[in-house]
Image (cartoon, helix red, strand yellow):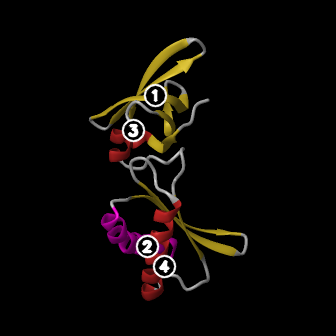
Amino acid sequence: MSSQVIKTTEELVLPILEQKNLELVDIKYVKEGQNRFLRVYIDKDGGVDITECGEVSEELSEKLDQADPITNAYFLEVSSPGVERPLKTKEDFEKHVNQNVYVKLYEPIDGEKVYEGILKDFQNNVLTIEYKSKTRKLSVEIPYDKVAKARLAVTF
């Protein structure tokens, strides 16, 4: 059910986003307590504002009402993915070279399953991350298919 809701929502929201030159980052359909939430994360270069989120929400809400893919009551939330946006596609990695990333792996590389550092390169389906280990700068190459989760990471 959840995967069908996400698929239908994606089909409905993509034309809206294309018209507004916005990007679909992620869709989640989750149950929290007694409530269900359909969360749509959108973005663009420079970030999205609340007005854009509101416009997409209104248009998507109308289309969801017509298609009626969700039988239970739910809350629709359209928002920015935030500063620690997930990196889900190869295009996401290409677009965020030279930015700080957090990457969790399916299996360890050099004994580690988590790396945080600067994404120096993404070529031939391999991420190159420069990270610090104590006082040394090191580099690791991670095959794209070994990435379980990735996101931008804020540094302070």
* Label 1 or label 4, whichever comes before in sequence order: 4
Circles 1 and 4 in contact, beta carbons < 8 Å: no
What span is in magenta?
1-20
Q: List the residue tagged with mark 4.
A: 61
Q: Amino acid at mark 3?
A: His
Q: CA distance from mark 1 to mark 4?
A: 38 Å
Residue 10 among those drawn in magenta: yes
Circles 3 and 2 in contact, beta carbons < 8 Å: no
Expressed as whole percent of the image width and height from the top left, the position of residue 113 reads: 54, 34
For the point 41% across and 71% down, which residue is it?
A: 7
Q: List the residue tagged with mark 2.
A: 9
For the point 49% across and 57% down, which residue is it?
A: 49
Q: Amino acid at mark 4?
A: Ser
Q: List the residue tagged with mark 3.
A: 96
* Label 3 or label 1, whichever comes before in sequence order: 3
Q: Residue furthest right?
A: 33
Secondary element at tag 4: helix
Expressed as whole percent of the image width and height from the top left, the position of residue 136 reads: 53, 12
Q: Quadrant of residue 142?
A: top left
Q: Amino acid at mark 1?
A: Ile
For the point 36% across and 70% down, which residue is it?
A: 16
Up/down of 12 relative to 93, above or below: below
Q: List the residue tagged with mark 1.
A: 118
Residue 53 among those drawn in magenta: no
* Label 4 or label 3, whichever comes before in sequence order: 4
Expressed as whole percent of the image width and height from the top left, the position of residue 83 reads: 53, 45
